[in-house]
Amino acid sequence: MVLYFSGTGNSKFAAEFIADEINDQCVSLNYVLKHNEPPEFASRKPFVICAPIHAGRFPAVVMKLLSKATFSGPRKVYFVATLSSKTCSVAASLKELAKNKHLEFGGLFFVTMPNNYVLGGNVPDHHEAEYQVKYVVVPRLLEVAYVIKNDDIMPEDNANPVVSAVSGSVNVMFNKFTVTSERFVVSDDCYVCGKCVEACPVNNIIIINGDPIFRKRCVNCYACINRCPRKAINIGKRTENVNRYVCLEYKEWKAKGIV
Ligand SMILES: Cc1cc2nc3c(=O)[nH]c(=O)nc-3n(C[C@H](O)[C@H](O)[C@H](O)COP(=O)(O)O)c2cc1C
Ligand code: SF4
Ligand code: SF4
């Protein structure tokens, strides 16, 4: 069973690609969260968990959900982290999670994908994203799927303990002070299409009197910002001139002949 959490579709694409290659089913953790479903997962094949890296770790909402989850079936778990840079020191937290769930840590794969972090600035346009998916992402996902399918040897994450500790503190600060929608503003370009409401995995957005209103449970997945067809959601003024990015659906990549 391939489980995924995804804000802008990268981790969903990775999950669906791998599921197709290893002939397994995909389950959306976004759906589980959004519909408040019990996190009970039963599989006949090893578990594969795909999620984005947010400030050096899997998002806190994902870790919390997985720590409450029950996993029945084979005891092996692989993790696939999609991210915009090359690597980060997330392995220790995932090994700990696997141990607590009585799962055998099969390995951690990094898949560098287009950046959705609009505050960072370097968000690709459609052409750059397509180039990256075709020439970087797809070849990497083929390698990942091969290792999982054949239960092959996984190279170890080689982050050193100092980097790991520092990035752990950065992540704690990030979750404490940055994970909020308090600074999100909606411009007059909004035409109340409801796509942000639909996209939010934690139901943090509601429409009141024709305006999208943000509640206090944002997990900073950036789905709403990137998926708004009018670029009407911004974080202050800093994101106004930055591209928006959403990964195409798996079937759309297939139709283009890229998968
Ligand atoms: C709030 C936030 C924090 C992020 N932090 C990192 C990071 O620390 N390192 C990194 O390489 N990419 C980071 N990114 C980029 C995403 O990990 C990357 O674009 C990912 O593939 C998005 O996956 P998704 O489309 O499944 O949500 C961050 C993105 C967001 C929205
Ligand atoms: S997605 Fe954009 S245009 Fe649609 S309701 Fe949300 S803010 Fe408005
Ligand atoms: S409000 Fe936007 S950024 Fe926050 S969790 Fe919902 S979709 Fe993600």
Image: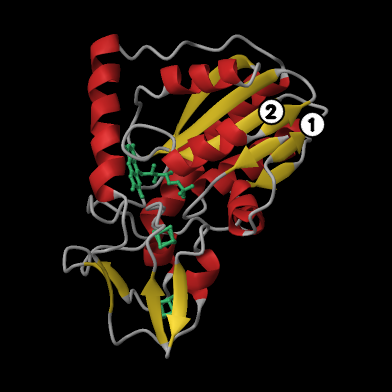
The answer to whether residue 194 shows anywhere in this view is: yes
Q: Residues within 10 Å of mark 1 (few under 14, many from 20)?
A: some
Structural distance between the alpha carbons of marks 2 and 1: 7 Å
For ligand 1, which image quadrant applies? top left
Residue 195 place in picture, x, y as percent: 50, 74
Q: Name the secondary structure under disc 2.
A: strand
The answer to whether residue 138 shows anywhere in this view is: no
Image height of 234 relative to 217, above or below: below
Give amino acid for label 2. Answer: Phe
Tags 2 and 1 in contact by the CB under 8 Å rule?
yes
Q: Residues within 10 Å of mark 2 (few under 14, many from 20)?
A: many
Disc 2 CB within 8 Å of nearest ligand 1 atom: no
Q: Quadrant of residue 210?
A: bottom left
What residue is disc 2 on? 47
Give me the disc on residue 77: none
Question: What residue is drawn where x is 22% and y is 54%?
Answer: 121
Give me the disc on residue 43: 1
Q: Name the secondary structure under disc 1.
A: loop
Image height of 158 relative to 177, above or below: above
Question: What residue is drawn where x is 69% and y is 14%?
Answer: 151
Question: What residue is drawn where x is 63% and y is 19%?
Answer: 147
Residue 55 place in picture, x, y as percent: 31, 37
